[in-house]
Amino acid sequence: MADAKKDRPWLIRTYAGHSTAKASNALYRGNLAKGQTGLSVAFDLPTQTGYDSDHVLARGEVGKVGVPISHLGDMRALFDEIPLEQMNTSMTINATAPWLLALYIAVAEEQGADVAALQGTVQNDLMKEYLSRGTYICPPKPSLAMIADVAEYCYTNVPKWNPMNVCSYHLQEAGATPEQELAFALATAISVLDELRPRVPEEDFPVLVGRISFFVNAGIRFVTEMCKMRAFVDLWDEICENRYGVSDPKMRRFRYGVQVNSLGLTEQQPENNVYRILIEMLAVTLSKKARARAVQLPAWNEALGLPRPWDQQWSMRMQQIMAFETDLLEYGDLFDGNPVVDAKVEALKEGARAELANLESMGGAIAAIDYMKGRLVESNADRVNAIERGETVVVGVNKYTASEPSPLMGEDGGIMVVDEGVEQDQIARLEDWRGARDGAAVAQALADLRAAAQDGRNVMPASINAAKVGVTTGEWAGVMRAVHGEYRGPTGVSGAVSNKTEGLDDIREAVDAVSDKLGRRLKFLVGKPGLDGHSNGAEQIAFRARDCGMDISYEGIRLTPEEIVAAAIADQAHVIGLSILSGSHVPLIKDVMDRLRAEGVDIPVMVGGIIPDEDRVTLLGYGVDRVYTPKDFELNRIMMDIVELVDPTAIAAE
């Protein structure tokens, strides 16, 4: 029987932001008018990694994967005519979370809002940045302290705000199994709560526990994913009660938002992604016991590039149809007492508990970063191998590949392209902002911020003051870098060959033959220029190249073109492989090619990323030898291309 009282729908969001604060504001107001019930802000990579728009590392990245926010003026423009006191805002921000929250609070105060009434979330999870997304700044321990600063400040001053969103989303994108996703996310939450516990009176700690939320991923195996969410609910309840003594069931509730899987979206037959997104949404809405509090869906064309407003609207309509046209919200839990579901949930919990115990024995999540990163790279290799061998079917990719042309693509290629003039416009506004502010007030605010960070005091009050006097994102992060130092996360790719070399004999022989001719082992340098931290593809290429017998050089993310060229020369690389998924491939690759020519170095270059056909032609015109996109999923073919670039006769012999 249906419940007498219908459940309220989840918060309906789309993850959005691009080009400029003004353009993103227009997008937000349009989406709110179409029935969106909460905002989910996407920031560009310079904002996420603490650089101003005119920094050398920001080149080509401004406004590409989100909105650039360099100072209070940008934040004002972003929320112009949007009353923050009435809004529920999720900000997908981590390393610079204290700063972006400070800017948000400053704008809310300017609007006359009651800051204590603000509702929303900052993601504020650095652990997954070290493991999968790569927008960290400082080392783990001071980063953990800043997460706790935000939580402690919100608990006192912004009590309805979620100060941390433990984010397992990117763990699954990096290849995590369901058990790993459960365990790694819960271990992160434990590390944060352990840090927070001494900061508040014991009797208030359960309230703080109750403000911790999660942000998860739902993949295509929707029965497993639904069971994973039920396992999350049970395990979190268990941890809160047994480890932290939280007696109030409300404070132990597993509260989560979700974005369904982007990893499984395909460039081939992209219209099929609509079905994938809908099926994945079922995993987090069907089960009342484990239903998401907020849902944001990718658009059908995100494997191709930046979605247009219409594409985002289509994803929003999917949620609205589910929430308002179906009878889903009229019933209790559909799966309670189901033996199949119960058995799967128990199996997932058992696997997660074992992994949690393993992490605990290492000293917890912070101490186990290298281990977790290595496990994710291995799990992702298994996933990639299964698709390559056809054991995992991906419709339109490795099965049922014959297709009609998609009428959805249109003249614009089915995506929105950010105007190249955006970067210069943003830089001009930034220069005007710096010129108009009170320099003495800025210097004093930065000195106060540095003192708070050095003394181990909560950085939020000093950050809010800095926001109000006009400090920029790069200046705020510059203080944190100066006080705490920078960090380079583990790559998860060791020099030792793995046990996944089955089926690689022909390639290994070709690599051996070419290496013999060269007089040394074929050297393959993998680089990630710019700020793009999505390293999964680069890691899998490096992992496979190593297993094929190549001598690999992979230093991880966030390198300048200058650093990559210098490394290629120093290492005497035979081939350079560059990976960029942020859309900044044209200016960054041009810079690399120009620098190679200026040095008089002739090394073949291959590039991988989300690269439209017209950009492919441009890159080849710069002298790039091979261009790969997500549809080039057969890594062994890419390995043979590397050999051929060094010695075409070797492939002819094969």
Image (cartoon, rainbow, N blue to C red):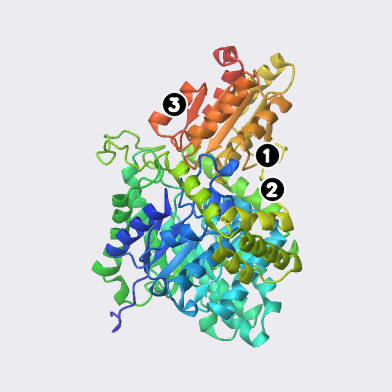
The label on residue 99 is none
Could you tell me which residue is drawn at 26 percent across and 34 percent down?
Answer: 404
| Few, some or many residues within 10 Å of mark 3 (<14, 14–19, 20+) | few
Label 2 vs label 1: CA separation? 9 Å
Is 542 left or right of 395, judged from the image as shown? right
Find out whether the residues at labels 2 and 1 contact each other: C-beta distance under 8 Å: yes
In this rendering, the count of numbered labels is 3
Could you tell me which residue is drawn at 42 percent across and 38 percent down?
Answer: 420
User: In the rendered image, which residue does mark 3 sit on?
Assistant: 618
Is 125 left or right of 272, judged from the image as shown? right
Find out whether the residues at labels 3 and 1 contact each other: C-beta distance under 8 Å: no
User: In the rendered image, which residue does mark 2 sit on?
Assistant: 488
For badge 1, the amino acid type reads Glu
Q: Earlier in the sequence, mark 2 or mark 1?
A: 2
Could you tell me which residue is drawn at 50 percent across and 74 percent down?
Answer: 161
Q: Pinpoint residue 498: horizontal percent, then vertical percent.
A: 67, 39
User: In the rendered image, which residue does mark 1 sit on?
Assistant: 555
Looking at the rendered image, the quarter that the C terminus falls into is top right
For badge 3, the amino acid type reads Thr
Mark in front: 3 vs 2: 3
- The secondary element bearing badge 3 is classed as helix
In the image shown, does 196 or 220 lie closer to the viewer? 196
In the image shown, does 453 or 238 lie closer to the viewer? 453
Mark in front: 3 vs 1: 3
Q: Quadrant of residue 598?
A: top right
Looking at the rendered image, the quarter that the N terminus falls into is bottom left
- The secondary element bearing badge 2 is classed as loop
Q: Quadrant of residue 163?
A: bottom right
- The secondary element bearing badge 1 is classed as loop
